[in-house]
Amino acid sequence: MNLESRKIRNIGLVGHSGAGKTSLSEAMLFSANVINRMGTIQDKNTVSDYHTDETERQMSIHSTLLSFEHDKTSFNIIDMPGYADFMGDVKGSMRVCDMSLFLINAVDGLQIGTERAWKYADEFKHPRMICINGLDRKNSDFDTQLNTMRNRWGTHVVPLQLPIGQGASFCSVIDLIRNKVLTWKQHSKGGWAESDIPEDLLNITATYRQELIDTIAESDDNLLEKYLEEGDLSEDDIQEGLINAVSNQNIFPIVCSSATQNVGTTRIMQLLTLCAPSPDTITISASINGEEHKIGVDSPTSAFIFKTMAEQHIGELSFFRVYSGTVHSGGELKNDARSVSERFNQLFIMAGKNRTNVSELPTGAIAAVVKLKNTHTCDTLSEAKYPITIPPTKFQTPCISFAMTTASKGDEDKFGRALAAIHEEDPTFHYEVSAETTQTIVSGMGEIHILAAMERMKERYKLDIAVTKPKVPYRETIHVFGASKYRHKKQTGGSGQFAEVWVKIEPLECGSGIEFMESLVGQNVDRGFVSSVEKGIHQICNTGIIIGCKIVDIKVNFYDGKMHPVDSNDMAFQIAGREAFKEAFKEAEPYLLEPIYEIEVYVPNKYMGDIISDISSRRGQVLGMDSDGHFQIIKAKIPLANLFKYSTVLRSLTQGTAEHTEKFSHYEEMPSNISLKAIEEYSESKKNSEKCLTSASH
């Protein structure tokens, strides 16, 4: 490959699942003579979707780097997933691209995965090109998709090409820059043949070409002046103006293709070479010695790790982009954030699972290195003398959670390592051991996301693991004042146990926790036992009384008691304090609190009624709605108990066109009928556990 910064083009293939990104990447590799025949998703033989979980599900799950050379240009194409569960990987990979090529399905049109990726492109200020793909399919409709995109993204969406003969015979486009018809032979590796535009299409061509020239001229004062003087622009003028207009995001050009037939691919690659910025023209903001600077091709060396991936027969790979300077094989760079140095022993140019060793990489190169020891996703490596830190990617919050368990008790350490490794590969996969439910809770962007992570853990670490519905961290508290006097007395020969504790309890405001105090007078209880009583009370508050959940928002006053000069001890007062609190708690009208989550649902207009009805069925409350194009954003609050697998249900209700976010809001009192049901379920579960223990003991 010609690894010169000015010859590199870093392109992200993005769009909704099924738009044809993987098929287009196959067509590009085929056209560049990297492969001899195009694979298909159905045949499970594409260069991009090569992981086991991808071939089994026949969908992209991982972003895949495809590096190749075509027409003296070095392309780094990243084929990204389109399914909502894997948008974290999309965002991380888009971060290191210089241009986004959006694929739109010619039949299904604009969908939620495209919308989300467009927002990321806005965030990263990416130039964009749009490809309406699948124009060989029955019911494909270029005009409808064009109008939809213009309604959504404005008049800056402008065709560079118009299709001729949509449907199975599609093989030609009108190219508005060249002002010619370009025709490909389906399934052929060759380029296109040029011909004049048919007379019956001259008027429509003139209309769209005029629109293209107007948009380009308006974005460049010199071209505008020339256009006003001469009344037209040459092909060279149009190309020059297009480069600047795309770079400045004044135009989002549209091209046409049938990726599976390899129609349009070579012209798209030519236009990407023309319009996508080269890395030697790009600067980004970074911190050097704590001060913000712009870095680029002439700055000291820096490399940003955007992805970590485990590969069979290789081990873990760290994928990175060189943002400044040159990275050398065998060279050493420092991770200033972790105060460690890393050696780049082997550098790989990647094309799916295929890799090629290289000795050095210039600014703009995207490549991989065998997993760096102490450097992780979103870390920066730079020269020790010039410590550069590139801001980490901000990933979205997970929207679904499961409890994950391992069947073998001896596997806990291996289980922990597996969880950490998956999080390292995928920052949107989170895990924690819940202090309240003692379960290992794994969270991600959707059910398939979690199941795919679980399958990787099973395969790689040989673990017997399963996911179940997580316990809801309910909480227990009281309505009114309560009091109790409890005597603990135990005599079994020798020294015994004696303690008497008198307590009063009262409710506190939500979020106050447990407030313990003592108001002892006289010498009935040695003050050394106050901490024992407090310890016993905190123990029962952590384990619960009604359904075994954490007790909160109560003020406890240890105001009197009795002790024995010989038999009173720390343990006796812990027990007495715990039991006194239990009795007072039961007297104080206890009730349950449930966690309430705030959600935002991003949904097309036509599914609004279904979503609002579903929210109501979940004891939810709609807080309001905002409009975003032909999508609505519904804001609501729903009890956590009714959010399990909500992302899966949401996609089912909307044919995969909606998504949501959720975050904790507050705790509130559970309705009495729901509370009684929770208590019954807890009692039944406790009985079953006790039966199991009894059977085991016999």
Image (tube, rainbow, N blue to C red):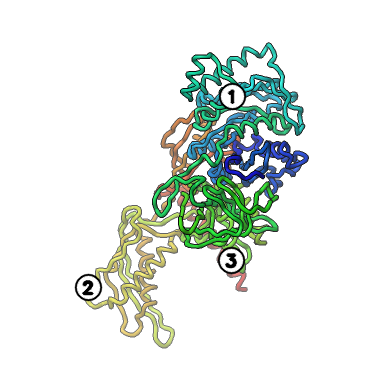
Q: Quadrant of residue 107?
A: top right
The spot of residue 298 in percent (x, y) is 50, 46
Q: Nearer the viewer, mark 3 or mark 2?
A: 3
Q: Are marks 2 and 1 in contact (CB under 8 Å)?
A: no
Mark 2 belongs to which amino acid? Answer: Val
**Toward the viewer: 354 or 81?**
354
Looking at the image, residue 400 sits to the left or right of residue 351; the answer is left
The spot of residue 681 in percent (x, y) is 52, 55
The residue positioned 58% from the left and 57% from the top of the image is 404
* Relative vertical location of residue 199 with respect to residue 576 in this rendering, above or below: above
Q: Which residue is mark 2?
A: 521
Let me know if residue 521 appears in the view. yes
* Relative vertical location of residue 330 with respect to residue 25 in this rendering, above or below: below
**Mark 1 neighbour density, 10 Å: few (under 14) some (14–19) many (20 or more):** few
Q: Nearer the viewer, mark 2 or mark 1?
A: 1
The spot of residue 273 in percent (x, y) is 61, 34
Looking at the image, residue 430 sits to the left or right of residue 52; the answer is left
Callout 2 secondary element:
loop
Q: Are marks 3 and 2 in contact (CB under 8 Å)?
A: no
- Measure how far apart labels 1 and 3 are at the Cα level: 65 Å
Numbered tag placed on residue 236 in the rendering: 1
**Toward the viewer: 57 or 74?**
74
- Measure how far apart labels 3 and 2 are at the Cα level: 50 Å
Nearer the N terminus, badge 1 or badge 3?
A: 1
Q: How many marks?
A: 3
Callout 3 secondary element:
helix
- Measure how far apart labels 2 and 1 are at the Cα level: 96 Å
Mark 3 belongs to which amino acid? Answer: Glu
Nearer the N terminus, badge 2 or badge 1?
A: 1
Q: Which residue is mark 3?
A: 412
The spot of residue 652 in percent (x, y) is 60, 38
**Mark 2 neighbour density, 10 Å: few (under 14) some (14–19) many (20 or more):** few
